[in-house]
Amino acid sequence: MIAFIITAIFILGYVCIAFEHPLRINKAASALITGVLCWTVYILQGDAETVTGELLHHLGETASILFFLLGAMTIVELIDSHNGFDIITRKISTKSKSKLLLLVALITFFLSALLDNLTTAIVMTSLCSKILSDKEDKLWFAGMIVIAANAGGAWSPLGDVTTTMLWIGGQISALNIIKQLLLPSIAVCILPALIISRRFRGKTIAGIPAPESSPKEKRDGKVILIFGIGFLVFVPVFKTLTHLPPFMGMLLALGLMWIITTVIHKTKEPEIAERYTVSKALQKVDTPSILFFLGILLAVAALQSFGLLKELATFLTATLKNDYLIGASLGLLSALVDNVPLVAASQGMYDLTTYPMDHPFWEFLALTTGTGGSAIIIGSAAGVAVMGIEQIDFMWYLKKISWLAILGFVAGIAVFLLQHAITS
């Protein structure tokens, strides 16, 4: 009975999020209420001390993602306030929207593997918002960025949190996952990119006037851009060197950016310097999106703690009885619930004696859970971040982008199976 109530609350919350605009209720409110109610029902039937301990454990994991997101968004805001992105936009020579979309998809795909899909999605969406003037164009580009960021993250040990989990857990090795998933991940990205680019065939970008800047302001913008991107690239390196969670590297990066901006503007009038401070950038960060993310992750954590996700994974195993069908199903499920607990449940269900390191099952799971989240805008951290930046409507994404993401998802599976058949 309790399981039914928690599931019903989660589904009802999801519906409220999906119909945010018709209901005129902010998605953050729906997510927060859903998360709190799920845990309230859970604690009523269990030992209060045990449930509270589980909640605090999950809150630690959730907070690490939120602080990472907050740090990355603040650094991007700092770059934007210094007109740093204008340095990049001036280098883009093509005026064709079709070619620009393919270029953005390509950069997002490979940058995501180097940084991670969340940071890359934030940077690229912010960049496109500077280049494009039409709101509809921004939405289509943002949708493509979500698909490309998740596809690029899947084949790199640093690109997606689930691939990182499998790497740290000993289920995959770094070089092998790159070798096995690069081509399938390209398929996931390239098919939607080609289809969307056809929509912009023959259309050109309106010239965006560059802001009036003095030589000193241009130099400041260049410094902030170089340091900002440099620190973002440094985050995965810091994680590898120290084995600390990624949010620690992001907080270090934010602290260093704080010092740099203070030094750069120390001679300016206080009123002028205020516009470029970290405090001002923090005010511009989309806080409701961060609270929305908090609510969703808390709700999913309640499902995980109650054992519903584990039961779901067990049910799929007993019903489907096929590694690839199980992997594909978990990938599509990751669009509805967070892919992290799904992969964690799989790691707990299947030990390394059943599926040793670099077994195709683990590689396939990394591909599907890394890219399946693109099917729904709130199915991945990258999607949630982009949704907040561009204010993408849940239903718009579902109608316009979801089928393209699923098409890419199926293409990636097909390439993986074909590649495996040839090499095995």
Image (spheres, grey):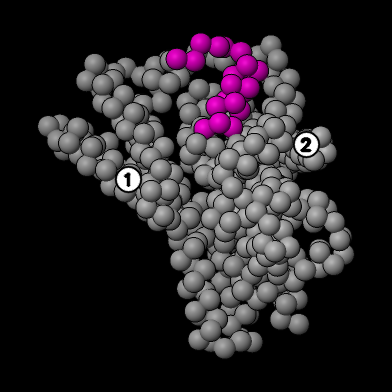
Q: Nearer the viewer, residue 65 or 366?
A: 366
Q: Residue at x 67, y 39 (%)?
A: 181
Residue under label 1, please give it: 254
Q: Nearer the viewer, residue 110 or 271?
A: 110
- Mark pair 2, 1: CA separation: 45 Å
**Residue wearing tag 2:** 423
Residue 345 showing in the rendered view: no
Q: Which residues are magenta?
A: 91-111
Q: Does the stretch in magenta take in 100?
A: yes
Q: Establish if 178 lies above or below 339.
A: above
Q: Secondary structure at mark 1?
A: helix
Total marks drawn? 2
**Residue 188, quarter of picture:** top right
Disc nearer the start of the sequence (2/1): 1
User: Residue 282: x and y, percent?
Assistant: 35, 47
> In the rendered image, which quarter is residue 303 located in?
bottom right
The reply to whether discs 2 and 1 touch (Cβ–Cβ < 8 Å) is: no
| Disc marking residue 140 | none
Q: Quadrant of residue 297?
A: bottom right
Q: Nearer the viewer, residue 276 or 332?
A: 332
Amino acid of disc 1 = Leu
- Residue drawn at point x = 55 percent, y = 27 percent: 107
- The residue positioned farthest toward the left in the image shown: 267
Helix, strand or loop at label 2? It is: helix
Percent across and percent down for residue 281 are: 34, 42
Please identify the quadrant where the N terminus is shown: bottom right
The residue positioned 57% from the left and 15% from the top of the image is 205
* Within-10-Å neighbours for mark 2: few <14, some 14–19, many 20+: few
* Residue 303 is at least partly visible in this image: yes
